[in-house]
């Protein structure tokens, strides 16, 4: 999805990309619901609404940070969300984080920081604060996803309501921002953007519903690693030694997280 955003950004504004990402995603998830004849009614409308509003607000703050800060800085601030999630867990999810997972999160975040090399000056404190708030908002949205899972809300319904509200919100945002006329060749990129975003949201929701909260958060750092790989393959971007070291730290973080979830072997159990 990030790679498609980079391609689309050559023509479209941030507001337009959020809108088309949400719109085509909404169409995809609605078609799935219609074909499977799944019910959209839910007794937890308020929880879906708060999850969707927080998620959309986090997205808007993230794009504001991207517009006013170096891209690497904005992404790094947004990826504080797993660290905030670890803080919220005992109070909102009543889960006690494993110490080894906290170590994995810190290692992963160090890897992100080394890879992206964020910088901020005195004139950018407001954008930096809002970028940090986007990470806080993302963490709260993930808490809501976990809580909806505990209420036995299906993944597709959670994604549907989030995508619906994001489409409406981004549509209003686009009306007061920038609008470019669509060409036929744009539809392939934008529809692929929406489809990949929807698949990612479904996978993320399922992961938080069925998996350990901090393991899922830690593995999310792999997104930046994969983005670097796409940059090498598609745009011939070259990474220096520091970048490869950072990638190694991110991989190590993921390995520690996965290892922590494995049950002890029969020999060690004895």
Image (spheres, rainbow, N blue to C red):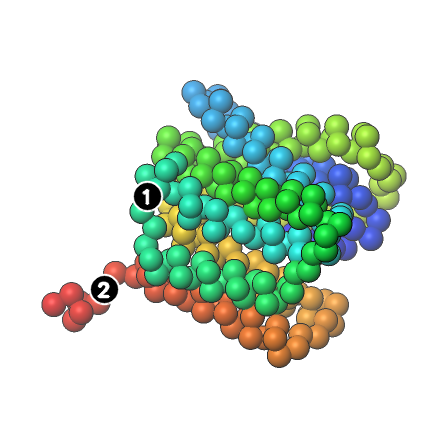
Q: Residue furthest front?
A: 122
Inter-mark Cα distance, 1 to 2? 21 Å
Who's the residue at 34% across and 50% down the image?
97
Asked whether 46 or 96 is in front, the reply is 96
Q: Which residue is mark 2?
A: 264
Residue at image coords 50%, 25%:
40
Q: Do the residues under discs 1 and 2 have CB atoms within 8 angstroms?
A: no
Callout 2 environment at 10 Å: few (<14), some (14 to 19), or many (20+)? few
| Mark drawn on residue 219 | none
Q: Is residue 9 left or right of residue 208?
A: right
Q: Residues within 10 Å of mark 1 (few under 14, many from 20)?
A: few
Residue underneath mark 1: 95
Kind of element beneath mark 1: loop
Relative to 184, residue 29 above or below: above
Question: Quadrant of residue 105 in the image?
Answer: bottom left
In the image, residue 47 lies at what x, y percent? 47, 26
Q: Is any part of residue 170 visible from this angle?
A: yes
Between 99 and 128, the residue placed more toward the observer is 128
Q: How many marks?
A: 2
Looking at the rendered image, the disc whose residue lies closer to the viewer, 1 or 2, is 1
Q: Is residue 74 above or below residue 23?
A: below
The local secondary structure at tag 2 comes to loop
The picture places residue 29, in percent across and down from the top left corner, at: 58, 36
Residue at x 55% of width, y 39% of height: 137
Q: Quadrant of the C terminus?
A: bottom left
């Amino acid at each position: 999805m990030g790679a498609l955003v980079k391609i689309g950004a050559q023509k479209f504004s941030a507001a337009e990309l959020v809108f088309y990402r949400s719109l085509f995603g909404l169409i995809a998830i609605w078609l799935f619901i219609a074909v499977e004849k799944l019910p959209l009614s839910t007794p937890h409308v308020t929880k879906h609404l708060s999850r969707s509003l927080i998620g959309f607000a986090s997205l808007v703050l993230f794009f504001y940070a991207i517009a006013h800060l170096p891209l690497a800085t904005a992404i790094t601030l947004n990826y504080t969300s797993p660290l905030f999630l670890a803080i919220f867990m005992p109070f909102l999810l009543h889960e006690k984080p494993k110490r080894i997972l906290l170590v994995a999160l810190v290692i992963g975040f160090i890897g992100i920081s080394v890879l992206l090399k964020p910088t901020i000056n005195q004139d950018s404190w407001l954008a930096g604060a809002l970028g940090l708030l986007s990470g806080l908002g993302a963490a709260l949205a993930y808490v809501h996803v976990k809580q909806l899972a505990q209420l036995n809300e299906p993944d597709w319904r959670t994604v549907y309501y989030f995508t619906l509200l994001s489409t409406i919100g981004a549509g209003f945002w686009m009306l007061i921002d920038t609008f470019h006329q669509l060409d036929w060749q744009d539809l392939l990129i934008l529809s692929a953007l929406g489809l990949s975003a929807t698949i990612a949201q479904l996978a993320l929701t399922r992961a938080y519903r069925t998996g350990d909260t901090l393991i899922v958060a830690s593995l999310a750092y792999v997104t930046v690693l994969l983005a670097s790989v796409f940059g090498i393959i598609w745009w011939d971007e070259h990474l220096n030694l520091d970048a490869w070291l950072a990638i190694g730290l991110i991989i190590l973080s993921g390995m520690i997280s996965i290892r922590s979830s494995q049950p002890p072997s029969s020999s060690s159990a004895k």
